[in-house]
Amino acid sequence: MRILAVDDDPIILELVTTVLSDAGYEDVVTAGSAEQAMTVISTVERPFECFLLDILMPGIDGVALCGEIRANPLYRATPILMVSRLDEKHHFDRAFAAGASDYVTKPFDATEFRVRLGLAEQMQRQQAQLAAAQHGKPDREKPRLSEAFMLDDVPFSIANHALESYLQGVPGGVGGMQCFALKLANAVEIHRKASGNDYEFVINSLADAVTEVLAGANYFISHSGNGVISFVVHGAIDMTEEEVARAVMTEVGMLDLRLADGSQVSPDVVVGSSSVSRLTSRSARIATMREAVMNAEGIADAVAGGKIVLQEQPRDSLLDRLFGGLAA
C-alpha cells in the first residue's frame, strides 16, 4: 500500500516512517506541509493508496487538505487517516465532515496504529476490486443488498466504516448524541425490481429526504447496507427523536421515485432511534447506534408480519410503537 504521510514536524514524520516500516509498509512518501503534499499528489506517476494527515499545521491545515484530496475524483474513496493529539470535538467533527476515513492519535500506540492501517488497507483493497470489476462498464452493476456503498452527493455523508470510527473516537464527556436508523422495510422487493444504478438511486433519494429534515443541524449520515441508512445528530437540534422520525417518514412519503424503466416504487420506511445524554465510552456510542438499527429492524419485521401498520406510526415513542404494535 502506497502511503503519503503529511506533518509539519520532521520528528513526527521520522517516527511515522519507522512505525510504518515496522508494520511492513515500506512504500511511504512524506511531506512537511499541505502545500508540499498537494504538489506531490499532482506530480506523482503512481497514485497513493492511503493518506496520513496531521490535523494542525501552519497555513493549510490537515482538515482543509483532506477536503482538497477528496475533491480529486481519483481519491474520492481512498482511505484518509487523520493524525492528531487533539481531543477537541470541534476539530474531530471537521475532519470527518471533510471526508476522513479514520483517525490515529498521538502519541502513537503501535498496536492501534497497525489495526488502523490494516483497516485502511482492507478498504483500499475493496475499492480496487470494485473499480476493476466496473472498468469499462457504462452502468454500474447493481450492488448487493448487503453492500454498504457510499452515498452519492448527499450532504455530510461518510462511509459506513468512517461513521463507526467517528463514534469510537468522539472525545469522552461531550454532550449527548441522537442516533437514528432509517430502514427500508421493502428493500428486498425494491432491490429485486431495480437494475443498474436504480437501487443506489432509491437509497440516495431516501438519504436526501433525511438531510432535508436535518437541514441546519450537525450530523453525519451513512448507508450501512440491507436498506439501512444510519445518521448521527451531534449538537443541539430543535426536534425530539419522535419529531425527527415523523418528519423523515413524512418527507419520504412525498417522494416520487421511478426506476429507469419508468415504473414507480413506493418505499416503506421506518425509523429507529436511541440517544444518551453523555457519551463517555466507545462501547456506549457504538451500542447507541446499534440500538437504533435494532429498533428500526424490529419495527420493520413487525410491519412485514402485519403486526404494525405504518400509517399508525409514530406513537408516543419508537419503542412503544414496536412493542405496542406487537401486543395489539
Image (spheres, helix red, strand yellow):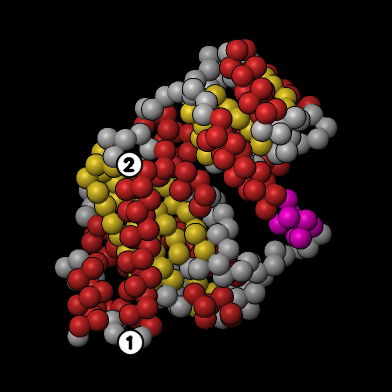
Residue at image position (64%, 48%) is 122
Residue 108 placed where, x, y %?
A: 52, 26
Callout 1–callout 2 Cβ contact below 8 Å: no
- Tell which of 80 and 194 is nearer to you: 80
Residue at image position (42%, 24%) is 86
Which marked residue is nearer to the observer: mark 1 or mark 2? 2
- Tell which of 131 and 106 is nearer to you: 106
| Residue 92 quadrant | top left
Disc 2 packing (10 Å; few <14; some 14–19; many ≥20): some
Is 234 on the left or on the right of 238, as rendered?
right
- Look at the image and tell me in which quarter the C terminus lies: bottom left
Can residue 247 be seen at all in this image of the molecule?
A: no
| Residue 317 quadrant | bottom left
Residue 299 placed where, x, y %?
A: 32, 74
Residue at image position (46%, 48%) is 164
N-terminal label among 1 and 2? 2
The residue segment tinted magenta is: 128-135
The residue identified by callout 2 is: 281
Residue 267 placed where, x, y %?
A: 44, 74
The residue identified by callout 1 is: 306
Q: Is residue 131 magenta?
A: yes
Can residue 275 be seen at all in this image of the molecule?
A: yes
**195 over 26 or under it: above or below:** below
- Tell which of 91 and 153 is nearer to you: 91
Check disc 1 and report its element: helix, strand or loop.
loop
**81 over 192 or under it: above or below:** above
Check disc 2 and report its element: helix, strand or loop.
loop
Q: Does the magenta stretch include residue 307?
A: no
The CA distance from mark 1 to mark 2 is 38 Å
